[in-house]
Every structure is written in C-alpha cells, then in structure tokens.
Amino acid sequence: MNQKKKIVTFGELLLRFSKNDHLRLTQGDMFTSKYGGSEANVAVSLATLGDQVEYVTRLPDTPVGRAGVMRLQELGVGCHHVLFGGQRIGTYYFEPAAGMRSAKVVYDRAYSACSELKPGMLPWRDILRDARVLHVSGITGAISRSSLDATLEALDIADEMGVLVSYDINYRKNLWRYDGADPRATLGLLLSRCDMMFGDAIEFEWLCQRRQPPFTATDTHFQMQMDEYQAWFEDLHRQFPRCRKWLMGMRNMVASSRHLLTALLYTSDNGQDYQLLKAPIHDINGVVDPSGVGDAFMAGLLHAVQAYPGDDQRQLNYSLAASALKNTIPGDFNLATDEEIIQLL
C-alpha cells in the first residue's frame, strides 16, 4: 500500500470577476474579483481538510500572479513548484443565476501563462517524489495543445513513479479552440489513464454518448434507477478498465437557490469485484454559490479515501456532504472543514 500522503494538483489558476447583488455583466460599473480554477479549488479544499497538498501551475511574474500564489499559501496550499513566466493570468467573468435565469460564464484565457506550458518545463520527478496522488482535469487538455502535451508528460512520469492519478472530466465546450482539438477523444484518453475520477451526469453522458436515467428529484424520496446505472457503469468499465473509482455527481436545479444533489460511486478495491453505491439526496434550499461544487466532490473523495480506507460508502457520503456545503460558500473555494462535513453526515 502506498504510504505517501501528499496530493499534487495541476492546472490553471484563474482570476474570476463578477458583479454584486446578482447584477448582470451588462449592468453596473463595479466588479469583485476572486481567485479560482478547478485544480486550485481541489487543492484549497484538501488543505482546509488538513491534507498535505501541493499546487502546480504557471503564472505571470506580476503582482496579480504573485497575489494568486499568496492567496493559496494563506489557505495552506503548498506552492513550491509554481512556475513563473508568460504575460497574463487567465480570467473569467461570472454572472450568477437568479430565479429562472441561468448562470453565465465568459472566459478570457487565450495566451495565458498556463496555456503556454510545454513538456519539459516542470520538474515532475521532483514534484511527485513524495506524492500519493496526482490530480488533473480535462481543462488542461482544452486550453492548448502544448498544455495537453504537458499534462500527458505528467501522467507518464506519475505512472513511472507509481503515483495514483485522479481526474475530473471538466468538459468546457467553449475552451476547445486550438487546431485539431478533439474534446471527446482527448478526454477519453485522459480517462483511460486514471485510477479515480469525477464527472457530473451530463459530462458522463456526453463523453460516452449513452443516455442514462434522468435525475429529476424534487424531494429526498426520489428513487434512483440503480439497475440501469449498474449496466451503464459496467459498460463504462469495459471501455476504461484501469479506473477503480468512478464518482458521478447529479444535480436537479428546482430553482437558482434550491438544488437537489446526490452522487453514485462505482468502485473496487481489487480491480475485479465492483459495486455501485448511492448517496442520500441533499435538498439544498438557499444556494449561495454553486461554483466549484464538482471540485468539492473530488476533494472530498481524495480526502475520504485516505481517511476511511475500505469504507466506500463513507467515502461517497463524505464527498457528497463536502459538495453540498460548498453551495453555501461564496467564491470558487470550498472552505468547509472536516468537522462541518462530519456534522452534516
């Protein structure tokens, strides 16, 4: 058994701009800013839960880039291998949902420092020397071809060193702009090389081009169609036999401030005897900010796998509780503590 405890996350740190009081992006003249980004969100959540975590990215050597590192360090994230270079940090503009109006995201990440990463720029053997898990996502495969190649380099070295790979599908259709980009093939390639993964139900369905039972819960008594999901996961496992933990998050948005949230975990400790587990449904009435909810799921699983070895149901329930609490916290980072998650459980 791998006794190493450090978790490494790799991806692009972003600066998020949004308006206050549910104003649209076309209203008002003041923006607030927060740092975020999927893999950074996972790192912050893990640090908040007390895990040893290192975040790897490339940022411009400017006050804005340095401030991002300072913010992560304030929250307990190791940033010893952040690479400085390039001209700009990636940004995005977020318009929150309100009532029947959906949320909106506008990306501005072209030519960002992280998108210009290339193989050989990061000392992966040093970075992963004491690591148990390397966490990546589909986003680094989407922002540029060179960033994808840098991610594949990291996975090659992780395999060579016996480091587990954690992966979040993170399909963002508006990011795939480079010549020859093939989102489904690329995200499938990354999935084929991971040991544990997360995706929401829509991403699973898109990636595998197979319809699944809809999650239309309006209360916590909704009955899941477990036989259909069992067959669906068995087919997925035949396509991607390496992965041993498949975490699927499901959400039904009754209104912008009320979400029903649950998850399934298809898992095996030996790579042969798989079981499909379901979590309870959380009825979250009073959603504050759903950004980063998937990242909270993944961080919850990475923490729980180490905290509750062999207890797959506890791992699943913990992941869901962490994600449910993120809905109550503004910004991208999940600052829910281990004590709060256990209390919710």
Image (spheres, rainbow, N blue to C red):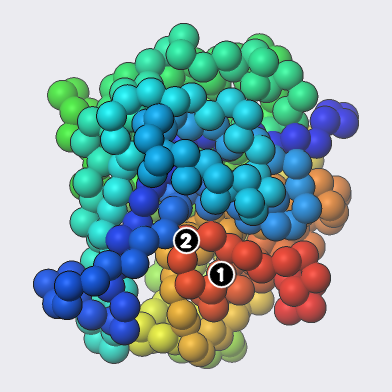
Describe residue 296's horizontal placement relative to residue 163 as left or right.
left
Q: Which part of the image, by quadrant, shows the N terminus?
A: top right
What residue is at 67 percent from the left and 15 percent from the top?
126
Image point (62%, 45%), residue name = 73
The image position of residue 62, as x and y in percent, is 37, 35
- Residue 177 place in picture, x, y as percent: 18, 34
Q: Which residue is drawn at 19% across and 28% down?
A: 178
Kind of residue at badge 1: Lys
Rendered view: 218 above or below 161: below
Which quadrant of the figure contains the C terminus?
Answer: bottom right
Residue occupied by mark 1: 326
Q: Which mark is residue 98?
A: none
Q: Is residue 73 left or right of residue 2?
A: left
Q: Nearer the viewer, residue 220 or 172?
A: 172
The one of 175 and 249 positioned closer to us in this rendering: 175
- Vertical placement of 7 versus 96: above or below? above
Q: Name the residue under label 2.
A: 332
Which residue is painted at 75% across and 74% down in the image?
Answer: 340
Front in this rendered view, residue 164 or 20? 20
In front: mark 2 or mark 1? 2
Q: Rate crowding at label 1 as few (under 14), some (14 to 19) or many (20 or more) other CA atoms within 10 Å.
A: many
Would residue 42 appear left or right of 126 to someone viewing this image? left
Count of numbered labels shown in the rendering: 2
Mark 2 is surrounded, within 10 Å at the Cα level, by few (under 14), some (14 to 19) or many (20 or more) other residues, namely many
Outermost front residue: 63
Q: Mark 2: which amino acid?
A: Asp
- Taking the image as drawn, is residue 323 in sight? yes
Picture coordinates of residue 187 (x, y %)?
Answer: 39, 35
